[in-house]
Image: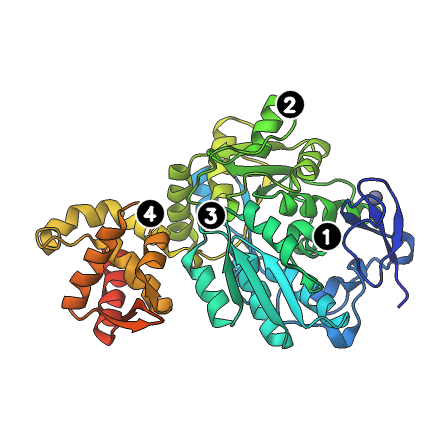
Amino acid sequence: MSSKSFLKCIGCGAEYDSYPIRTVCNKCGSLLQYTYLYEEIGKSFEGAGFWRYASLLPPVSKESIVSLGEGGTPLRRAKNLSKKLGVKNLFLKDETMNPTNSFRDRAATLMISNALDLGYKKVICASNGNLGASIAAYSANAGIKSTIIVPKRVDLGKLAQMHIYDAEIIQKGEIVDEAIIEAEKLVNGNYQATPELNPLTLEAQKTISLEIFEQYGVPDWLLVPTGSGSTAYSLWKGFQELRALDLIKKEPRIVIVQPVSCAPITEAYKGNKDIVAVKKPETRALALLVANPAYGKLALQAVRESNGTSIAVPDEQTLEAERLLAKSEGIFVEPASATAIASLQTLLSQGEISESETVVCLLTATGLKAPYVLEALAKDRLDSRRETLGLRARGWDISTKLKILRLLDLGDSYGYEIWKATDKKISIQAVYQHLEDMERKNLVQSFTKERRRYFTITEKGKRVLQALEELIVLL
Ligand SMILES: [Zn+2]
């Protein structure tokens, strides 16, 4: 296949043909990066959605393209929110509108098309959520098997997506960093779709910038929720390619946004030092829970070259921003996305961004993927209303029972596994007490399989679970 691109090693500079696509350098093992022959690429794009930008993407044969209608997401003018925040031109790049409701569908369409093109029957992907859901969906559509390696801390909605799309799910480690190492070990001749190990992710995600350019032009600022750093860097790369095509004269200033208690890139930026892995990473924005960001260096480069900045915001501010966005604009995002809105408040109050400048916030994924956030948001109110409901008086520990019911709703399980899923915050005996209590109330039933006592959720249990979920939202 003729191609207008080639691969260049980010370590030693060695060059390779771009087709068939390879991921790492034979000579030094570093990641390879796409470089395009811009003078041979046209300045206009054809078609709709993600594949409109095929001329600026790694080559995939047309008949191998696996698409669910990703990309082409709206750039919404935030009329109400901009008034509340005191900025004139605020736009939201709404990636919740993608087929599995996150921006990662862009990476999935490109990687799964590539896998199909190269004749792979199975893909491996380590993910802390959104990409796992995307890869599982696109693999299902392509008739390819998928194995997703997830850490313990993963949003329940994303896990549910992986289950329903019939991925094989392997749990490894507390956070995604450990899952990535496992994915490297398990690949065994199958297609590697882990973003930290496959440069196609960077290529796919840059289409967000190409769309922003076509929808608006070049904003002054682009605020990017950041975990591994791949998104911030690819957005920067997208605008640089538009400049290489002579379509724009300047790039936006890139802002990296991280949660305060997991901000390795921001700390490196502020201290003007190398990136150091976070020892005890913690945040409710699970999509950003990355201790050692694989693309951190490249993301920092994007910030420095664009004269942008890197900022950290506390979780409380993020959850407030999530609510503010939802009630102002009718858009419900996951906490990771809300960090962008939270950081805008801070940057405006510090005078870093002025009210007359144009700002685009990247909204990465829907809030429906992270139902524990509903719990967190409603918790205060739930605590005060519990007495009224008489639930506390009857000795109901709602949060644990709810967790157990949610888990069993996804499939049968046994005591030890259930205990692990409760983050081991209570004793295993307490978990059994909850299970026995719920069995007496006919919310769960137990049975023996392979000498283990398994639990299954009953119809009544399902009704109670649904009612509780509704209560949490309504209270
Ligand atoms: Zn190399």
Q: Answer yes or no: disc 2 within 8 Å of ligand 1.
A: no
Residue at 64%, 75% (x, y): give it.
Answer: 142
Q: Sequence order check: which comes first, mark 3 or mark 2? A: 2
Disc 4 is placed on an element classified as loop
Which tag, 3 or 4, sits closer to the chain's start?
3
Q: Are marks 3 and 2 in contact (CB under 8 Å)?
A: no
Frontmost of labels 3 and 4 is: 4
Observer able to see residue 72: no
Q: CA distance from mark 2 to mark 4?
A: 38 Å
Residue 475: give x, y in percent of width and height.
Answer: 22, 54
The numbered mark at residue 463 is: none
Residue 25 lies, in percent from the top left, at: 81, 49
Q: Earlier in the sequence, mark 2 or mark 4?
A: 2
For the residues labelled 4 and 1, the Cα–Cα distance comes to 36 Å
Instruction: Tell us which disc is closer to us: 4 or 1.
Output: 4
Viewer-nearest of labels 2 and 4? Answer: 4
The residue to which callout 4 is attached is 424
The alpha-carbon separation of the residues under discs 3 and 1 comes to 23 Å
> Which of labels 2 and 1 is toward the front?
1
Q: Are marks 2 and 4 in contact (CB under 8 Å)?
A: no
User: Which residue lies at the image location 12% right of the left edge and 51% below the top edge?
Assistant: 392
Q: Say which residue label 2 marks.
A: 272
Q: Amino acid at mark 1?
A: Pro
**Residue 185 placement (x, y as % from top left):** 64, 54
Q: Which mark is residue 199?
A: 1
> At label 4, which amino acid type do we have?
Lys
Task: Please tell me how crowded label 3 is: few (under 14), some (14-19), or many (20+) other residues with Cα within 10 Å.
Answer: many
- Label 2 Cα crowd, 10 Å radius (few <14 / some 14-19 / many 20+): few
Residue type highlighted by circle 2: Asn
* Displayed quadrant of residue 221: top right
Q: Residue 331 versus residue 36: which sits nearer the camera? A: 36
**Circle 3 SS class:** helix
